[in-house]
């Protein structure tokens, strides 16, 4: 992908507003405040293409960024406690609607906060991805916030939880740039699986 080709394409509040799936889609999923917008900006080398949420949980829309070889799909963050039942329901309809819509999903980038155990919502999402046999990678954000000892402990824990179960995961820091080349390479490989082999 040519990162300089990235441009904001659409924001959908309902599934009916989604345009045709005419490009491989890279989907970003995670709880509010996990660092999703920051990661997308970092990947695309932009300051503020994806909005870094001033009001966590407020934006229950699917936002899409178009590149030359793929489309990045930014799902609304989950797990924000202060949203109403109605808003949670709307979130569920939107996200389920997208994931069930037989879109050309090339890769789901499932974000978790590296400092903590995955939340119940994170686990539910990962189980869903496994059940649906969707290609995905777990990206553990904010790795720069861990000191050496804690990093080793968290790495061991995530290896036991994911790597031992055949799920790939990688540490990521939008501050230090850790994981950026790896994730870009994975996205490229997912968009052109045959060419990468
Ligand atoms: P979103 O709600 O998932 O889109 O989260 P944001 O991208 O808005 O990030 C939430 C907060 O975490 C912001 O204050 C970011 O500056 C901070 N943040 C995001 N990624 C990182 C990271 O890799 N390292 C550090 N130290 N902070 C981060």
Image (cartoon, rainbow, N blue to C red):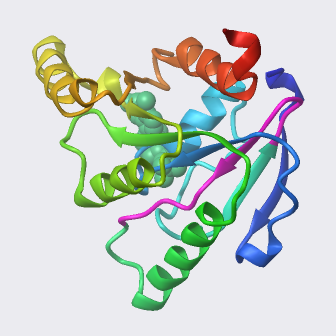
Q: Is residue 13 above or below residue 191?
A: below
Q: Quadrant of the N terminus?
A: top right
Q: Is residue 79 above or below residue 181?
A: below
Instruction: Check the image and name the residue furthest to the bottom.
Output: 86
Q: Position of residue 63 (x, y in %)?
A: 71, 57
Q: Quadrant of the C terminus?
A: top right
Q: Position of residue 75 (x, y in %)?
A: 59, 57
Q: Is residue 142 above or below residue 23?
A: above
Q: Quadrant of residue 156?
A: top left
Q: Quadrant of ligand 1?
A: top left
Q: Quadrant of residue 47?
A: top right
Q: Position of residue 20 (x, y in %)?
A: 87, 59
Give the overall secondary structure of the magenta segment: loop
Q: 127 or 144, which is in the foreground?
A: 127
Q: 184 or 167, which is in the foreground?
A: 167
Q: Position of residue 77 (x, y in %)?
A: 48, 59
Task: Count the labels in the image.
Answer: 0
**Does 138 sit left or right of 20 as displayed?**
left
Q: Residue at x 20, y 21 (%)?
A: 155
**Does 9 sit left or right of 38 as displayed?**
right
Q: Which residues are magenta?
A: 66-79
Q: Quadrant of residue 85?
A: bottom left
Q: Residue at x 56, y 67 (%)?
A: 95
Q: Is residue 103 magenta?
A: no
Q: 74 or 18, which is in the foreground?
A: 18
Q: 78 or 42, which is in the foreground?
A: 78
**Does 149 sit left or right of 99 as displayed?**
left
Q: Residue at x 66, y 27 (%)?
A: 190
């Amino acid at each position: 992908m040519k990162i300089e080709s990235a441009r904001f394409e659409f924001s959908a509040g309902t599934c009916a507003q989604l345009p045709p799936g005419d490009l491989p889609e890279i989907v970003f999923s995670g709880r509010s405040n996990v660092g999703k917008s920051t990661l997308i900006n970092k990947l695309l080398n932009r300051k503020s293409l994806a909005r870094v949420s001033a009001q966590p949980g407020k934006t229950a829309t699917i936002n899409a960024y178009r590149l030359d070889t793929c489309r990045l799909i930014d799902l609304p963050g989950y797990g924000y406690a202060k949203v109403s039942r109605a808003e949670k329901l709307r979130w569920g309809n939107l996200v389920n609607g997208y994931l069930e819509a037989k879109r050309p999903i090339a890769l789901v980038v499932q974000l978790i906060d590296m400092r903590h155990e995955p939340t119940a919502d994170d686990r539910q999402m990962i189980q869903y991805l496994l059940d649906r046999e969707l290609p995905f990678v777990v990206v553990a954000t904010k790795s720069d916030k861990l000191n050496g000892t804690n990093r080793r402990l968290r790495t061991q824990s995530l290896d036991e939880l994911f790597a031992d179960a055949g799920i790939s995961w990688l540490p990521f820091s939008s501050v230090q740039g850790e994981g950026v080349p790896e994730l870009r390479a994975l996205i490229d490989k997912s968009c052109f699986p045959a060419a990468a082999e």
